[in-house]
Image: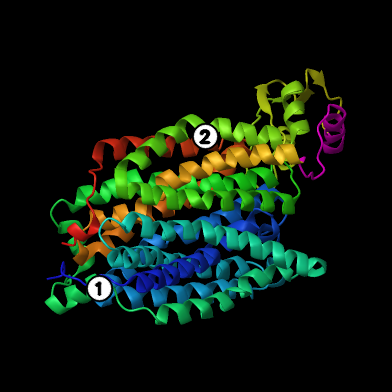
Amino acid sequence: MADEVCEPSASEMRMVISASSLGTVFEWYDFFIWGTLTATGILGRTFFPSGNENLATLLSWATFAIGFGFRPLGAVVFGYLGDKMGRKYTFLVTITVMGLATAGIGLIPSYREIGATAPIIILVLRIAQGLALGGEYGGAAIFVAEHSPEGRAGFHTSFIQASVVGGFILSLAVVLLFRFAAADVWESWGWRLPFLFSLVLLVISLWMRFRLSESPVFRAMKEAGETAGNPFVESFTYPGNKKRLLVALFGIAGGLTVVWYTAMFSVLAFLSGPMRLDQTAAQLITGAGAVIGVGFFIFFGKLSDRVGRKPPIVIGYALTLVLLFPCFYVIGSAANPGLAKASRREPVIVAGPHCTYDPFATTQADDCWRMLDDLSRLGVSYKTAKAPTVVVTIGGQVVESNDPKAVKAALEDAGYRFDRIVPEPIDIAMILVAMTVLMALCGATYGPVAALLSEMFPSRIRYSSMSIPYHIGTGYFGGFLPFISHYIVARTGNPYAGLWYTFAVVAMALVVTAMGLRETVALRTSRR
């Protein structure tokens, strides 16, 4: 029977966790490096048409999202292979595809050199990355869970969860390292080095994972002839599985991923964008917050072995709804106090007959649109109003000319500062406090999830059943978060408005999880 498996020794368990976790770190590094460099603006300038900075940034985040959009297809393909052929060899394939696709991005000529061919090739490689990642997470999480002794799955799989943060931290560290080492050529070609570095990580990952043995649960199933005939079909026909799939999608995957991406990518984009921090300072601060937060994933994973998987997740969602906006207000006030004070003291109002802004337009249609475009690129919050002609007021004072240079000069006279800054140490400490709160919420909602999802589904279809909802949820709810949030901010002129997307998705996830999730039992008693 598939239930009767031999538990690995402590040394074997350490090897399983180490190899699976490091492979996951490297694979998420490959995926996140695009997002890390998109936040700096360099990829938008390189691979997309110039002329509208917001449009280039939106296209970069849309490309980031495309990879996520194909993760569900990867989950179907590699989930099928993982349930039919085994966990080990499936995620050997996924990490190879990911590493080669990432290195390929570093070799693509710019838009200026080959025109529209550049973004087309980028899309193809991002799709390949999405397909690979769709098979990676489920394989690594299940591989560790199925090796874990009873009552330890939450703790052991929490290292896989923390590895996702590790991938983000590694992407920041490598970007900073190469940016320093290749400072003179960074803008021209040095930024390509982090992508090419993926080949080194690929070799290390393959070496470690080839040394692993197949999951004992899968070996037992195969010997007993209990593997699924068609894991994809059975995922939707197995008794009670449809409800579990829906809860995993809308309650677990959708919620945890927007909390995580908000805490990492939204903070990084917020600091380096509207708050106008020095790029290196923004990356170092965000990276430090991520490092501080890694321990929360391990803590809550281990806690879930004692109190259950559901309580930390539900409480984490509820606290996110309460603390999300306050945390970002603290970050904004501390990151650039002068800009925050100027925005409160000297609010900007743009009035005109048709004051709406289209971030997707290469050129804006009238004076009001162009004014909003200029303000958005400067990171200045604004409100709009109806008026017969276009008028800009700053702190109640009318700006005599609508010329962009005149408006910028008036803003500077009112106390707005547009040079890149490095916050004071006390302000950095405040940012890190707020980020620590956000990372604690990530740990609560994400730390127990690998064990939870492994326990929700029967072993014969576990890879498919776990991967499909997880990657649909993370791919669409989370992957499109930076794009949607940036669009909302650009459209409204409010740097905090994009958080409402996170708030809405987490509220949905809280209701679904609280009402629909049944507490799971220890994995060793639910092998079937």
Magenta region, residue range: 403-424
The part of the image, by quadrant, that contains residue 192 is: bottom right
Q: Is residue 318 left or right of residue 342?
A: left
Q: Report the residue that reaches farthest toward the front.
A: 10
Q: Which residue is mark 2?
A: 324
- Closest to the observer, 355 or 10: 10
Seen at 48% across and 39% down, the residue is 502
The part of the image, by quadrant, that contains residue 409 is: top right
Q: CA distance from mark 2 to mark 1?
A: 42 Å
Image position of 435 with respect to 216: above or below? above
Q: Is residue 85 left or right of residue 89?
A: left
Disc 2 marks a residue whose amino acid type is Leu
Q: Which residue is mark 1?
A: 216
> In the rendered structure, are the residues bearing label 2 and label 1 in contact, judged by CB atoms less than 8 Å apart?
no
Q: Is residue 366 magenta?
A: no
- Judged from the image, the secondary structure of the residue bearing numbered disc 1 is helix
- Point out residue 215 in the picture as x, y percentages from the top left corner: 28, 73
Q: Is residue 102 left or right of residue 362?
A: left
Q: Is residue 421 magenta?
A: yes
